[in-house]
Amino acid sequence: MLARTPRTLVTPSAWRIIARAHSSHAAPPSFAPSGVTSADTEIPYGDPACASSAYLPQKDGARTQTEEEKRAVSETPELTPEQRDVLEKIIRVDQAGELGANYIYYGQKAVFAAGSDKRTTGIVQAMWDGEKKHIAAFDKLITQHNVRPTALYPVWKAMAFGLGAGTALMGKRAAMACTEAVETVIGEHYNEQLKQLKADFPDHPSIPLLEKILTEFRDDELEHLDTAVANESQQAPAYALLSAVIAGGCRWAIKTTEKI
């Protein structure tokens, strides 16, 4: 069973996220101030109760950051080569993973929105909205820590959209089985990364903030897993085979993104 814990609450880079208009909306929805992420999704406002809000736009009247909090989102710590390798793999893999998650839900939403199952469309949209927060935060993290992003952006976008749309075409249960398999692997991976960060990293405010964000996002993903199970994911046709194939693909993608 995956562990759960309660939720807690820039240096320039050569790489920059290229803003593009998101074609799925004529105007930004109410939860988004402006701008788009590397997954072509709207950047949502931060929830002050969540650690990720440190990297997201704030609504008027939000509390001003302390100097320590500003350091946490603007500096990268001095690290040994081994520590730097760990940090880069964590941020590169997670940013790519959240890119893929957004495109999975994008594909599922495209299929369900074209049909008559409004309830499933709403469930998918709600989970997708959560993923928009994740990719927006990791876009900032990858720039702050000057991490090289994966070179496989186009591949992951195409494969993730295809996975989302393909399982949605198989029906609601198959789409939910896809969510369950993906979120199980991601939850496990976040747990592994949290263990790595607790092992001998320097006393710099960006590290405990990253730990809190990984914990927050892990718990979000596990909520999506629970939603999928509650919506009959395990009753999907060929559930065991479908889940094994998707989970295996996710683990392969993680290993590949660590290197490329």
Image (cartoon, rainbow, N blue to C red):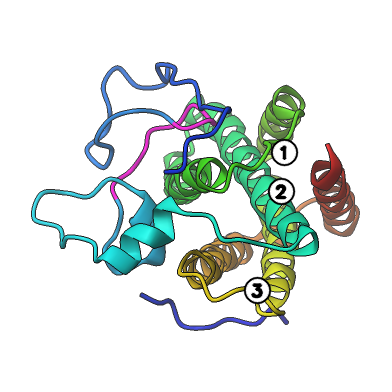
For marks 1 and 3, the one nearer the N-term is 1
Secondary structure mostly seen in magenta is loop
Residue positioned 59% across, 42% down in the render: 146
Against 4, residue 87 (above or below) is above
> Which residue is under mark 1?
167
Q: Contact (CB < 8 A) between labels 1 and 3?
A: no
Instruction: Name the kind of residue labelled 2 in the image.
Output: Val
Q: CA distance from mark 1 to mark 2?
A: 23 Å
Based on the picture, tell me whether residue 39 belongs to the magenta stretch: yes
Against 83, residue 34 (above or below) is above
Nearer to the camera, 82 or 50: 82
Q: Could you say which disc has been placed on residue 229 in the image?
A: none
In this rendering, would 249 be left or right of 104? right
Q: Determine the image quadrant of residue 8.
A: bottom left
- The magenta region covers 37-45
> Which residue is under mark 3?
201
> Which residue is under mark 2?
93
Instruction: Name the kind of residue labelled 3 in the image.
Output: Phe
Residue positioned 72% across, 79% down in the render: 199
Q: In which quadrant of the rendered image does the C terminus lie? A: top right
